[in-house]
Image (cartoon, rainbow, N blue to C red):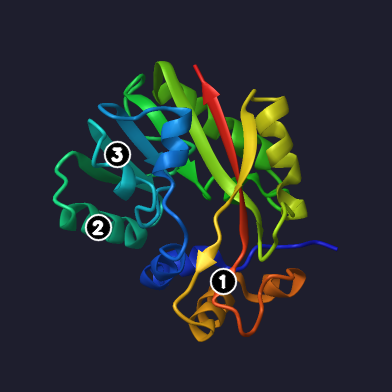
């Protein structure tokens, strides 16, 4: 059976604010990133930045932040967050991650959260070529001594890792072909109510909720497993 992702592309273009409301119910990730690569004073690129989930929490200590994404609507929310926080060390760039309009050796740290997977899905016939193009771009932009940190799903609604089948080949390539180290963490959602949990998770995960055991109809808490991959140059 072929498994496909929900129509996230449409969500990112048309319902960016609603998507942002969903992901703000998860823990921030600055401590996890700092453990891998202390980022104070660094030039950081956030690839597939979306609504600024990573950029917004890294900007306070970074020397600079460049947030890139294919969706202008998502970047608009990221820009609002960064501006509202009083940061002046950032810019947003609408771009395809396979061809970043950034200078060679311009970043000390590159982060990518839940974004490369859309190219890495085995339902994409050219996934290997596309992922390879992304990896070449990340290495081009990264300075010697830098680090790449990638976050991807390992299963929403599960207490233990249960990643989608269509991402397994991509995940294997990250470690076996590209040399990334890997671990998994919990990033559980904490909603304000069971009603909010059902509304926001149904909106984004749709029928995928049916394959998980952690989407209780009366639960404001939804378990989430995430994979973390990192590479030093």
Mark nearest the camera among 3 and 1 is 1
Q: CA distance from mark 3 to mark 1?
A: 33 Å
Circle 3 residues within 10 Å: few <14, some 14–19, many ≥20 = many
Which residue is rendered at x = 66% and y = 74% of the image? 215
Residue 2, quarter of the rendered image = bottom right
Which residue is rendered at x = 67% and y = 49% of the image? 121
The numbered mark, 2 or 1, whose residue comes first in the sequence reads: 2
Q: Residue 134 in the image: x percent, y percent?
A: 53, 34
The numbered mark, 2 or 3, whose residue comes first in the sequence reads: 3
Secondary structure of the residue carrying tag 3 is strand
Q: Which mark is residue 66?
A: 3
Secondary structure of the residue carrying tag 2 is helix
Q: Residue 49 in the image: x percent, y percent?
A: 39, 48
The reply to whether discs 2 and 1 touch (Cβ–Cβ < 8 Å) is no
User: Can residue 42 be seen by looking at this rendering?
Assistant: yes
Taking the view exactly as shown, the residue that stands out farthest to the right is: 1
Mark nearest the camera among 2 and 3 is 2
Give the answer, above or below, for where 97 lies relative to 157. Answer: above
The numbered mark, 3 or 1, whose residue comes first in the sequence reads: 3
Give the answer, above or below, for where 196 lies relative to 90. Answer: below
Q: CA distance from mark 2 to mark 3?
A: 14 Å
Q: Badge 1 is on which residue?
A: 221
Residue 93, quarter of the rendered image = top left
Q: Which mark is residue 81?
A: 2
Circle 2 residues within 10 Å: few <14, some 14–19, many ≥20 = some
Q: Residue 182 in the image: x percent, y percent?
A: 64, 33
Q: CA distance from mark 2 to mark 1?
A: 25 Å
Q: How many marks?
A: 3
Front residue of 206 and 121: 206
Q: Which mark is residue 102?
A: none
């Amino acid at each position: 059976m072929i498994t496909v992702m929900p129509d996230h592309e449409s969500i990112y273009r048309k319902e960016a604010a609603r998507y942002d409301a969903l992901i703000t119910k998860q823990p921030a990730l600055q401590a996890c990133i700092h453990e891998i690569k202390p980022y104070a004073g660094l030039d950081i690129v956030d690839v597939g930045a979306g609504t600024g989930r990573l950029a917004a929490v890294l900007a306070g200590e970074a020397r600079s932040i460049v947030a890139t994404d294919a969706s202008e609507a998502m970047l608009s929310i990221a820009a609002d967050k960064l501006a509202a926080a009083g940061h002046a060390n950032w810019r947003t760039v609408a771009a395809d991650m396979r061809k970043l309009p950034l200078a060679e050796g311009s970043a000390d740290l590159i982060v990518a959260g839940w974004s490369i997977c859309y190219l890495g899905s085995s339902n994409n016939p050219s996934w290997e070529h596309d992922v390879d193009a992304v990896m070449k771009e990340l290495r081009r932009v990264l300075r010697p001594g830098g680090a790449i940190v990638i976050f991807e799903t390992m299963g929403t609604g599960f207490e233990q890792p249960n990643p989608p089948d269509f991402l397994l080949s991509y995940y294997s390539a990250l470690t076996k072909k590209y040399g990334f180290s890997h671990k998994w963490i919990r990033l559980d959602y904490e909603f304000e109510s069971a009603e909010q949990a059902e509304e926001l998770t149904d909106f984004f995960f749709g029928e995928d909720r049916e394959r998980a055991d952690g989407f209780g109809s009366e639960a404001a808490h939804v378990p989430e497993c995430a994979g973390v991959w990192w590479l030093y140059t």
